[in-house]
Amino acid sequence: MKSTSALATAVLAAARAKGITLATAESCTGGMVAAALTDIAGASDVFDRGFVTYSNAAKIAMLGVSPETLATDGAVSEAVAVEMASGALKAAGVGIAIAITGIAGPGGSEHKPEGRVCFGVAVRGHLTQSETVEFGAIGRENVRMAATRHALDLIAAAISLRR
């Protein structure tokens, strides 16, 4: 398994090779994906910005997430992840934006258990995609790290779609 640093390095190299810029919109990871990318020297030619939108108010104000979507689906939902990713893509004017929202723990509920993380991937010129991963009740730090690694994998896959 590649380290988070190795994943981030590979993502930046692939984006650089294709002239793609990146942005992140993070909730439960609190900026960890942006940090992983910016830990690599020279990331500024590819990584534009990161939005840490931990509260619903921040999701609405910074990314244009609909209050109705939040009320209907909840912050931890693919619908919100899609709106977060699309909002980051638009606000930053980048080629690819990743969004992460979830329940790192401790806690959760029967309907939204600890370890559930929803991802949105917005690629300029394509429909925004989403997925949910159930990491399980593996502890807050482990959920956040697993979500960060998964987000980097999703960005790498999105870059490979671009010509």
Image: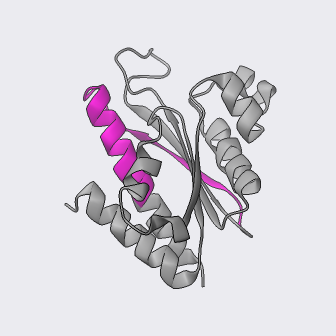
Residues 10 and 71: in front is: 10
Quarter-wise, where is residue 72 in the image?
A: top right
Furthest-left residue in this view: 1
Quadrant of the rendering where the C terminus is positioned? bottom right
- According to the image, what is the colour scheme of the structure? one colour
Is residue 13 visible in the rendered structure shown here?
yes
Question: x%, y% of residue 129?
Answer: 62, 55
Q: Residue at x 70, y 56 (%)?
A: 92
Is 146 above or below relative to 153? above
Does residue 62 appear left or right of residue 7 in this picture?
right
Residues 127 and 23: in front is: 23
Q: Residue at x 74, y 70 (%)?
A: 125
Instruction: State the extent of the magenta-drawn residues as a range.
Output: 126-152
Is 156 above or below relative to 81? below
Residues 130 and 86: in front is: 86
Question: x%, y% of residue 144?
Answer: 36, 36
Quarter-wise, where is residue 97 in the image?
A: bottom right
Is 161 above or below relative to 89? below
* 22 magenta-colored: no
